[in-house]
Amino acid sequence: MRIPQGTSEADFKAALQEFTNVVGPDWVFTSDEDVAAYRDAYSPFVGQPDKMNVAGAAVSPTTVEQVQQIVRIANKYTVPLFAISTGRNLGYGGSSPPFSGSVIVDLKRMNKVVEVNETEAYMIVEPGLSFIDMHRHLTSIGSNLRLSAPQPGWGSPIGNGLDHGHGDASFNGDNFSMVKGLEVVLPSGELLRTGCGAVPGSKLWMHYEYGFGPYINGMFSQSNFGIVTKACFWLTPNWEVQQSFTIESDKTDDMQRYIDALLPLRNEGVLHGWGITSPIRESGAHNDGRHPYGPKEVYALLHSPEGGTVQQWDDLGRSSNIPAARGMGSMRGAAPVVAAQLAYARERLKGLPGNFTVGKPIYGKDWLGPRIDFGIIAIQETSHGHFYFSPMFKAQAKDIFAINDTIRRVMIEHNDYDMLDNFCWSGTRGAGPDKYMLILLEFLVHDDIDLNNRRLDLFRALVKTCGENGWPEYRTPSYMQDIVMNQYSFNDHALRRFHETIKDAIDPSGILAPGKAGVWPKRLRKT
Amino acid sequence: MINTKALLTGVAVSLGVVSGTHAADAVHGQLVFGVWCTGCHEPLPGPSYAPPAGTYVLEQHYHGRVPSALEQRTDLSPTQIRTTVRNGRNMMPQTRKTEISDADLDDLIAYLTQHNKTKHGK
């Protein structure tokens, strides 16, 4: 059993006994086998157990009152807790705590649908309810509401939303933007409802998130300020049809012209999603289970000192019949509205160079729902999964090329041509980001400890260099929380120091998720 | 082939919260499979744009020596299933008792071994 630093073995065991009194012996996990089930399934420290973040035990409550009791007991014995909703945040540390020895508060059994309102399109749910559970519930009641689910769908709306995850159905893919009200057990054990939920008998908890006074929902996302036990989400009705289009040319320089045309359409609300990329530059990539389809000269250009000139890439694209620039747009909704939006977009893009192609319509009724399905991402040469490098950048051609070239140079400096060939280049893919974009690059985990360690060094170097260039991570695994918070260092880390001031005030015992988002309680802070 | 769509959309059953001793129930085990395993382990090509990952990987591994879809296998042992569910394998992560309880796992094993030609010990 791993006893957390700063807690005596006697106190740790006394706390476990009291947890047992609260939830019963079946739902406090202390055996090595049961506790190992809370490890990071995709840890890059495989084979290096001394470097892994591991839990000390786990406790699984079913009610808010039990969560409150667990938190009060943890205060009494100074036992660190780390709450998980479903712990399926694979690629970002899963159920593993940032501070080893923490007791996992496994909220999986708190899986109730509190309320669904079809007309007003909202739901109130508990944290252990997965996207799959909720989809089945919506289907069983004949609802036309659609979840904004990532795949695989065994994560939870609350867990995904609180970690700033993206789904495919909310306004811009940002699930936390759809959270209107929270119920939170504070580090003292006190129960708080945010926004209009603070009004006794409130009818507007799920309607108006601001309530009155400082707006604090965000303080409970990616944070260690409380354990969220309920959340109100706005939902969207399933759409009738989604229609996409692409515009492609053989000139790299057309990329910014496409952006200048597509982003205003997105800003006007004509487009639901949009994207931009350079297919010839991406054509050698094989991360994310993709198959390279470009010529081998792609790698020669990538490996060259300057990474290839615009003319070289355009020439290679022409000779291989792969575009140098591609813009993408999509709209969704009722068929007549989508048809009008498509016609309008086509008119607005008229006069731009390149070929305009309309994609095959996708009908909302054909949606399979969230599933435990890893898709092509699982078909990779890895023995232990992956973790994500996920920096944000501006949706402008200059920034897209700059971050890609920076990543390329850091990989070459680390002599990691395998990783460079794997990555190649990235525009943006999928629905979601709006004025900003994301690169999602999987770092595969292997049986080779030295290789994993070299990749971790590369990851840290990428985070550091990208941070210095204004491209911070939006989310990161449990073992990388500190280096990512260090990217947000304006005015001598004023943001982190503000978080620490709040942390010390509301959690003086320092028990809730020490180290989450690089925020440590005073008793564990390195000065 | 199992009608997984009906399983996934037509039945609302709470899983993962059963404890205590009980007789293994292959019918309930089918439901457990439908919730936790189908997405990656249904027969190829599967309904999504990408093949079911687990079935695809097993197809590459066995090259037809045994069926790649788990529900068509008649050689899986209870120990093999239990170990894989609890410990995971490659990309497949481990599953906790708050997700698939020991009783649910017994049912899943009963379902996946019900057509076995030889009986394995648990």
Image (spheres, coloured by chain):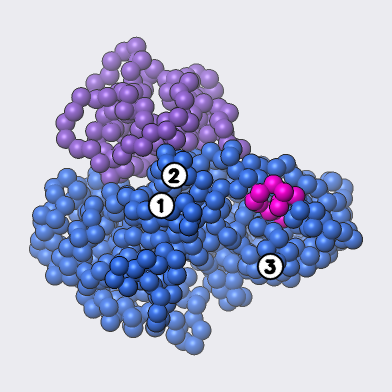
User: To which chain does the residue with label 3 belong?
Assistant: A
Given residues A453 and A130, the one toward you in this image is: A130
Outermost residue, bottom side: A491
Separation of disc 1 and disc 3 at Cα?
30 Å
At x 53% / y 54%, what residue is drawn?
A: A236
The purple-coloured chain is labelled: B
Circle 1 Cα neighbour tier, 10 Å, few/some/many (<14 / 14–19 / ≥20): many
User: Which of the two marks, 1 or 3, is nearer to us in this view?
Assistant: 1
Check residue A267 in the rendering and tell me which mark sits there, or answer none: 3
| Magenta span of residues | A329-339
Check residue A116 in the rendering and tell me which mark sits there, or answer none: 1
Outermost residue, top side: B117
At x 27% / y 24%, what residue is drawn?
A: B25
Circle 2 Cα neighbour tier, 10 Å, few/some/many (<14 / 14–19 / ≥20): some
The blue-coloured chain is labelled: A
Q: Quadrant of residue A351?
A: bottom right
